Image (cartoon, coloured by chain):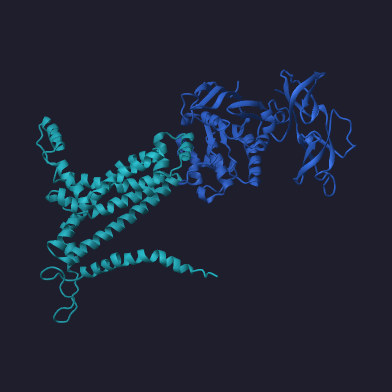
Chain colours: A blue, B cyan
Amino acid sequence: MALLEIQDVTRRFGDFTAVDKVSLSIRAGEFFTLLGPSGCGKTTLLRMIAGFDVPDGGAILLDGEDLAQRPPEGRPVRTVFQSYALFPHMTVQGNIAFPLKMARTPAADIPAKVEEALADVRLTGFGKRFPHELSGGQRQRVAIARALVTHPTVLLLDEPLAALDAKLREEMQIELINLQKEVGITFIYVTHDQTEALALSHRIAVMNKGRVEQIDEPDRLYGLPRTRFVAEFIGTCNLLTGPVTGSADGVVTVDVPDLGPVRVSAQGAQATRPEGAVAVRPEKVRLHAPGSAPARDNHFTGAVTGFLYQGDVTVYMVRSERGHTLEALLANSGSGLAKFFEVGDAVELSWPADAGHFIDG
Amino acid sequence: MHKRAPAWLGKWLVSGPPLLYLVVFFAVPSLIMVLASFRTPGEFGGLAPLVDESGAVDLTLDSYTRLLSEPLYAEIFVKSFWYALVTTVVCLVLAYPLATLIAKSERRHRDLLLLLVILPFWSNFLIRVYAWMIILGPNAALARAVNGVLALFGHEPVPLLFSAFAVLVCLVYVHLPFMVLPLYANLEKHDQSLLDAAQDLGASAWQRFWRITFPLSLPGVYAGSALVFIPAFGIFAIPDILGGPDDSLIGNVIKQQFLETRDWPFGSVLSLVLTVLALALAGLAAWIGQRGVGRLASGDA
């Protein structure tokens, strides 16, 4: 039995359907992420779990109990807001003690619990400070400590790292993973940042236009995207679409205009529609000097039209003979300065059938 | 090439005119009053000459000893304090929900609602006070209704006009906008996410108000209270027009000293004491407020 059951939840704002018959089940102790572009309904869904918004249809069950009749203050669910929403007129201690007081914790027990929560987020000694005396990362941790101090069943995090700079964000990601392991509380995390989602989560639900596109573990989501949207939203992807021209021995052939026939392992997927797509990650596309490519299932010639040198890797844009642009990623793992191809160089591209992934429809 | 004007020039250009205004129309008159409070009243009002016929400088503490030796004046100060305090508290209680309502209403309605709050300023202050004479008059509907109800319980009819009630009602009416506006200005800036967070953390509607909204609105409460209390403390027109014989406040006594008794030194003393008391009370309130905020903040409250 899942801890949190979201059953056919729908939310409309006028003509706009923000959340459209979403069903999810989230297990106890899980780090679950709702991932999607802005306006995909992920924050609306989060607000409905917290109780700030009410579904127009469907039910939200926590431990088997329908939450519909429970106001936000009566749910064993806490939220870490994007803006942190720390009370500016209270010290860090006052902020963290707030939910304890609301829960009528005996006054004698409060200081110890506050100290414990501060230690959990590595802010021991900061209790007497006011929020405006803290850095962004510290405020973030106070918000988390305040939400965790009463040991809620579920912690909701609404883009909590969005306001932090890249370096700090990475630090906080590691801290969040450790914290979640430590406290064992179910985290439901909302973000539009796919790398963050991949790094943090046990499972991810990718949302688009109010619907869930795919729910999976991060590696499966990246490796086996079920829809074109997921393939393109998670990481970068060469999405090669065209009519399906053959399907035999577990290999599907898609005739991509401007490129040619592309062969891909079906890996369980069935070609049920006349159109299909092949998703090939740039790092799986091999790049060779002309004439040196080994015989592979897919082999094309083209010319480099541009590249982005990113230090550890270089991303090459290659235009095929017939005019399709593909991305290929080359790790700069060799010794010395890495520079393989220049703009205009003729190159060959290749990848085995099982490097790609077939998307039906 | 342009030469940049020195920074001090800009500072003085901006702050000079208001400073000059305050010196000429506040500091200098205040000093004149301080001086006047130590002088002897003239035979026919005004002030006796500073240097008398014998050539001695005529400065005296008589007016101050009079204030201290006649308890009547202290009593009037205390009475004025209570009237001003009741006015401030009633204004606060009435203005808080109103300011909240305006702050929470849709943006396009706010201007209209604010306009309605300041609409009374479009007519003259005295006219508005006289209007209350009609509203509270013995033959007006209000007095008839009140006395009709009282008669049902076998009670003698009571006059509404020329009473402490009339004075307080009008004091509240006149000063209400001065409480509403600073409260609105404060409440309008409140961040909804703080209330969401409080609710999420288990706070009921009352707790959200008492622990979040109210403490954060205290600057507005102080500003409004000062704007109501200080003028109400020294008011004379309203008790003059709507009050009974027992409703004379310190403002009336000061006016009387200057215009009727023509004892300028004693009037100056009363005026100065009024000013000092008002400033001291405002300072005290701010100090208590600061401590209160601190207590709520550290979580001891």
Nearer-the-camera pick, B297 or A298: A298
- Is A354 situated left or right of B69 in this image? right
Q: Compared to A174, does B22 lie above or below?
A: below
Asked if one can make out residue A128 in the rendered structure from this viewpoint, the answer is no
Nearer-the-camera pick, A104 or A152: A152
Q: Position of residue A146 (x, y in %)?
A: 53, 39
Q: Position of residue A137 (x, y in %)?
A: 59, 46
Q: Quadrant of residue A313?
A: top right
- Is A252 situated left or right of A217 in this image? right
Q: Compared to B83, does A43 lie above or below?
A: above
Q: Quadrant of residue A327?
A: top right
Q: Quadrant of residue B300?
A: top left
- Is A233 situated left or right of A342 in this image? left
Q: Quadrant of the C terminus of chain B?
A: top left
Q: Position of residue B55 (x, y in %)?
A: 17, 82
* Residue name at image x 61 percent, y 34 percent: A37
Q: Position of residue A101 (x, y in %)?
A: 46, 37
* Residue name at image x 17 percent, y 41 percent: B135
- Is B15 situated left or right of B226 in this image? right
